[in-house]
Image: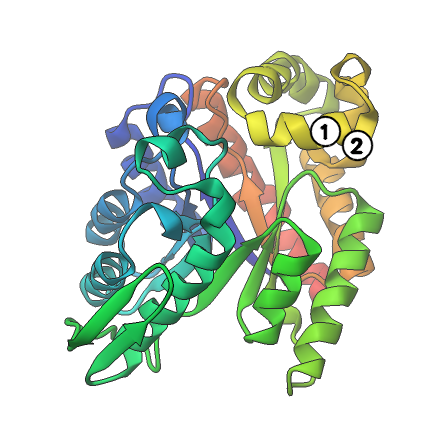
Amino acid sequence: MKFHLFVMGTKSGSYHDILDQMQAAEELGYDAVVLAERHFRHSELLSPSPFCLAAAIAARTKRIRIGLAARILTLDHPLRIAEDAATLDVLSGGRLDFGATRASLDEECHNVFRSPIDESRSRFQEALEIIVGAWTQDRFSYPGRHYCIPEVSVFPRPIQKPHPPISLVTVSPESLKFAAGRHYSAIIGATRFLPELQEAVLSYRNAYAAAGLNGSRGGLCINRFIYVSDTDEHARREIEAPFLAFIEERAPDLRRVLVRKYGSAERFSFERFREDFCIFGSPDTVATRIGQLQAGLGMTNLLCTLNFVTLEHALCLRSMELFAREVMPRQEVMAA
């Protein structure tokens, strides 16, 4: 099992606090840190400029991989994204995991950056083709609907060959099959219930095999909201109100998904969230829940959301430390 730490901002943590936390994550044995892209009123979630933050993390660390979940390809020119990503791969010594998505949390930044959200799927697909072509071809041109690029050479080239690993955020069945059909990894969101996860895993593996390979467990990264404290009671006391506030106030995309699942926001409750998709509790409880996921899904990559913008930084840091010291070693024993 590989453990990826998804990096959101915290209630009281500065950018420098987050950099210290990423350095600690490397020392604690996490395999990767993963950054999102957020803009304007969502910027406190981290970060409006993920490549800048990733470069700072690269300068502070030696081993840990640095991922994106994900760069919103439709908000910038794909050649600029290709150049920035390749530069980061060089600066980090080949540690970039390139994650991409087509849309933001809501339409605000699409309107501001004049990138219509109803064109996002076709823009995203063109942008991704351009980025991969720029990384892998000596000279490259692209006659697209949204982007028309004359023959150019793009530098620097990534250290990783033929290019950094690519992961796509997969919200819909179509995006999941798109990723699998091109042999890209898929990031599966944190609010999916176990039956939905099982269906997504099966769909991805079938599409992956149909595209010419024999399936890949390593091609899936499953996100979970996680909080660890000394006991289940302490965990609930510390995370209940902050997590409910996070869903209601800071995660409009997740709130919409959960309203569809439960029928209305009035049916939200901490108990239902904890039972359906959150992993909160003591180290024993958290280790058991993750073990069940691993057994039920054949999961080998876990994206751990341990930071919450509504929770004090010190509590996020302590949860991260408890998870590394008391939960991660148990998963290694179970896998063996």
Q: Distance between the residues labelled 2 and 1?
A: 5 Å
Kind of element beneath mark 2: helix
What residue type is disc 1 on? Answer: Leu
Answer above or below: position of 188 versus 133.
Answer: above
Answer above or below: position of 7 versus 1.
Answer: above
> Residue 243 at what x, y percent from top left?
61, 20
> Residue 67 at what x, y percent from top left?
40, 55
> Which mark, by number, is residue 1?
none
Query: According to the image, label 1 marks what residue?
Result: 258
Is 238 placed left or right of 320 in the picture?
right
Query: According to the image, label 2 marks what residue?
Result: 261
For image coordinates 47% across by 41% down, the residue present is: 117
Kind of element beneath mark 1: helix
For image coordinates 24% across by 31% down, the residue present is: 16
Question: In front here: 303 or 174?
Answer: 174
> Residue 255 at what x, y percent from top left?
64, 25
- Residues at badges 2 and 1 in contact (C-beta under 8 Å)? yes
Callout 1 environment at 10 Å: few (<14), some (14 to 19), or many (20+)?
A: some
Answer above or below: position of 172 versus 137.
Answer: above
For image coordinates 55% across by 26% down, the residue present is: 251
Snapshot quadrant of residue 128: bottom left
For image coordinates 62% across by 70% down, the residue present is: 180
Is 43 placed left or right of 117 in the picture?
left
What residue type is disc 2 on? Answer: Lys
> Residue 51 at what x, y percent from top left?
26, 49
Question: In front here: 134 or 292?
Answer: 134
Quadrant where the N terminus is found in the figure: bottom right
Snapshot quadrant of residue 244: top right
Question: Does residue 281 appear anywhere in the picture?
Answer: no
Question: In front here: 72 or 44?
Answer: 72
